[in-house]
């Protein structure tokens, strides 16, 4: 025994890399939710077990503490908030198994701190969510059973998280939007697969608001509403490699609802495709709001029988208004290399506010033909200024 000690010491002294690795392994807290009583049979309520496991992960101060939600099991969760701040600068939620919502609407248990949301992560910096698992919102009962005077919940809400990394998960059948991101600074979101039936109401893929420096990449979205919606307070959002459809496309807004002051800027949407979607790339605002949507680029976009491939709609409000003195200003919007087919003959619609016209709308290489043989596409434009270079259909900017 005594003879071993110098040898061990020598090993540590002579091998600094393995020394560091051993130290890291020792300090990383790795929590399996099953060890905290989670059953994972898809029926038992595993909420308290996951919260207990979470408090251990969030309270651990070294390395990257990990919450493991293992493969081969299905964990039923009630509405739950995984709250920070956490002690470690980086936290990993490794979802390899499945999470499901309660089966019926009546089975959902709400509390004062958790309303209108199913699973929430809030106030956690350096949060990494990944693992290849699945989140199933069991939304069908809500789509049919919750219409008037009833609020359907968001499946996954991530709020006030700096430097988020969120990847490799499947999201199914949310009661409402699948993922919402708010008040986050710095986020890389990639390799998500989000699906819900074409006709399921308000089942957006990802909604983002009040966030900056966000990348959403290489994901597949087929839902009943927007694949991605970029809402007020967003800037520096890059969306690339999204396959969207069915769904309502990628939207900026709606902005300016009920007189709101909303702002969005520096949004880059690149290398995305839209198959059979109700819209392609859309900017939508309400009359009578204020603020702006500016510095927005849609580049290398492909449409396959999309119904309204390119659309700016500044009359999105359900009730048209007369004599409005304000509007959300839309400017510096570029469509570069947008091509493919439109299911409607009206392939490009730039319908700007008559109070606050659009400026510097740039169409640079568009070629959108009809998906119906023998039909021609056309563009409409009102209250819009800018330039158009090499465009099919021609746009009168
Ligand atoms: C996102 O990815 C980019 C490029 O790999 C990297 O520079 C950035 O730090 C990442 N951000 C986060 C929050 O991980
Ligand atoms: C978004 O893309 C632009 C243009 O390619 C780039 O300059 C910017 O750094 C990117 N921002 C993020 C948050 O990835
Ligand atoms: C474009 O997006 C697709 C996913 O739809 C991806 O496979 C491809 O690598 C991307 N290409 C570029 C040039 O970014
Ligand atoms: C537009 O696309 C159609 C169908 O792919 C193609 O036949 C046509 O040559 C293209 N026109 C231009 C100007 O690129």
Image (spheres, rainbow, N blue to C red):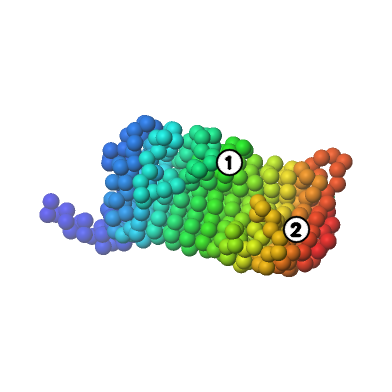
Given the current orientation, which residue lies at the most extreme front position? 323
Given the current orientation, which residue lies at the most extreme right position? 374
Q: Residue, x 33% and y 44% (percent of image)?
A: 50
Label drawn at residue 350: 2
Please name whichever residue, 205 or 316, is drawn nearer the observer in this view of the structure.
316
Please name whichever residue, 302 or 149, is drawn nearer the observer in this view of the structure.
149
| Image side of residue 361 versus residue 252, left or right | right
Q: Position of residue 245 (x, y in %)?
A: 65, 43
Q: Earlier in the sequence, mark 2 or mark 1?
A: 1
Res 327 visible: yes
Q: Residue, x 73% and y 50% (percent of image)?
A: 309
| Image side of residue 269 versus residue 342, left or right | left
Label drawn at residue 181: none
The quarter of the displayed image where residue 40 is located: top left
Q: Position of residue 216 (x, y in %)?
A: 56, 54
| Image side of residue 52 versus residue 160, left or right | left
Please name whichever residue, 28 or 392, is drawn nearer the observer in this view of the structure.
392
The quarter of the displayed image where residue 261 is located: bottom right
Res 32 visible: no
Q: Is residue 228 above or below residue 384?
A: above
Label 2 and label 1: CA atoms lie apart by 26 Å
Q: Residue, x 78% and y 45% (percent of image)?
A: 344
Please name whichever residue, 273 or 388, is drawn nearer the observer in this view of the structure.
388
| Disc 1 crowd, CA 10 A, few/some/many (<14, 14-19, 20+) | many
Given the current orientation, which residue lies at the most extreme left position? 2
Q: Which residue is mark 1?
A: 201
Q: Are marks 2 and 1 in contact (CB under 8 Å)?
A: no
């Amino acid at each position: 025994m005594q003879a071993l000690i110098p040898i061990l010491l020598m090993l540590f002294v002579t091998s600094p890399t393995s020394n560091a690795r051993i130290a890291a392994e020792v300090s990383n807290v790795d929590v399996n939710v099953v060890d905290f009583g989670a059953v994972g049979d898809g029926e038992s309520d595993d909420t308290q077990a996951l919260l207990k496991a979470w408090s251990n992960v969030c309270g651990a101060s070294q390395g990257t503490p990990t919450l493991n939600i293992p493969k081969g099991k299905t964990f039923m969760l009630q509405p739950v908030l995984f709250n920070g701040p956490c002690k470690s600068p980086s936290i990993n939620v490794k979802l390899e198994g499945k999470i499901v919502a309660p089966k019926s609407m009546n089975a959902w248990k709400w509390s004062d701190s958790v309303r209108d949301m199913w699973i929430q992560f809030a106030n956690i910096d350096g949060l990494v969510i990944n693992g290849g698992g699945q989140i199933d919102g069991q939304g069908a009962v809500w789509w049919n059973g919750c219409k008037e005077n009833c609020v359907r919940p968001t499946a996954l809400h991530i709020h006030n998280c700096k430097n988020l990394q969120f990847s490799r998960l499947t999201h199914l059948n949310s009661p409402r939007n699948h993922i919402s991101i708010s008040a986050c600074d710095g986020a890389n979101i990639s390799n998500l697969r989000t699906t819900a039936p074409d006709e399921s109401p308000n089942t957006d893929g990802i909604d983002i608001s009040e966030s900056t420096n966000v990348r959403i990449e290489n994901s597949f979205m087929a839902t009943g509403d927007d694949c991605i919606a970029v809402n007020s307070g967003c800037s520096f959002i890059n969306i690339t490699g999204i396959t969207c459809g069915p769904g309502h496309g990628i939207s900026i807004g709606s902005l300016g609802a009920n007189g709101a002051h909303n702002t969005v800027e520096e949004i880059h949407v690149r290398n995305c495709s839209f198959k059979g979607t109700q819209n392609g790339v859309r900017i939508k605002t309400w009359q009578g709001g204020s603020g702006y949507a500016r510095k927005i680029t849609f580049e290398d976009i492909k449409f396959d029988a999309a119904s309204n491939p390119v659309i700016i709609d500044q009359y999105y409000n359900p009730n048209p208004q007369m004599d409005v003195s304000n509007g959300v200003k839309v400017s510096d919007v570029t469509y570069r290399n947008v091509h493919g087919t439109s299911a409607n003959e009206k392939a490009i619609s730039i319908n700007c506010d008559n109070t606050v016209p659009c400026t510097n709308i740039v169409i640079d290489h568009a070629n959108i033909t009809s998906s119906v043989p023998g039909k021609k596409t056309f563009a409409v434009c009102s209250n819009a200024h800018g330039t158009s270079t090499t465009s099919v259909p021609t746009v009168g900017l």
